[in-house]
Amino acid sequence: MLYEYLKENYILGEPIFANDIEIPGMTEENLRYHLKKLTDDGIICRFEPGVYYFPKISIFGDKMQLSADTVALHKYIIRKGKRIGYYSGYTLANRMGLSTQVPFTEEITSNYAPAQVRELTIKNRKYIVRRPTVEVTEENVKVLQFLDCLKDVDKCAEEEPEVCGRILTKYAIEHGITKEKVDMFIANYPIKIYKAIYETGVAYVSA
């Protein structure tokens, strides 16, 4: 029963979190027993306690290991196909082109953050996970990332303010970020964000 459930709900190389498994009538003890049996039989692999996966097979016929970044992505950013977080801080600044520095510790903002700010380790890889100012959804994630960049522009960006403004204006246009959308969330951010808007000259009113 567990095998059929996992095959139906997970693809190769996707983390399986034991806490997410819901099978009517199956107790936690029974679940642990069957997960161990599937692991012992080589059907699934164990990444760390509570995290399993169906391994992808390399062109050489070897089982490919799951990466810590893949586990972090599915645990804190997109969980069971639902948007629950996004990359933030120095990680977001680098991905947005506001900085060329590739941070050693990736930063994530997530609804599933265990504390306001917490440094976590996944298989020797460190992450900083923060709680969001408002619940992250697929509908608001682009606006929240936009506002996060402005909030942290003085700390995380390497480019001059006007360059950051051009980059963020382009982002706003590409993702349809309007003044009305910004106004829905900006009150949740520190007052310094208005200074960042002024100094960068960012335009976030799009058609």
Image: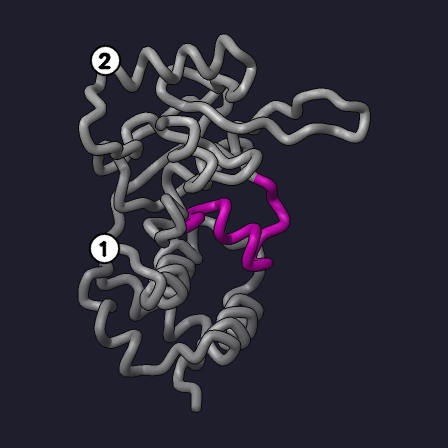
| Tag 2 and tag 1, C-beta contact below 8 Å | no
Residue extending farthest top: 40
Q: Which colour scheme is used?
A: one colour
Q: Where is residue 101 in the image (x, y as percent from the top left)?
A: 60, 44
Q: Which one is in front, 71 or 146?
A: 71
The type of residue carrying mark 1 is Glu
**Pointer 1 residue:** 135
- Closer to the observer: label 2 or label 1? 2
| Rendered residue at 30%/32% (across/down) | 21
Q: Determine the image quadrant of residue 108.
A: top left
Q: Give the range drawn in magenta.
A: 86-102
| Rendered residue at 40%/11% (across/down) | 36
| Rendered residue at 42%/33% (across/down) | 4
Q: How crowded is mark 2: few (under 14 residues within 10 Å), some or many (20 or more)?
A: few
Residue 95 is covered by the magenta coloring: yes
Residue extending farthest right: 60
The type of residue carrying mark 2 is Glu
**Pointer 2 residue:** 29
**Earlier sequence position, callout 2 versus callout 1:** 2
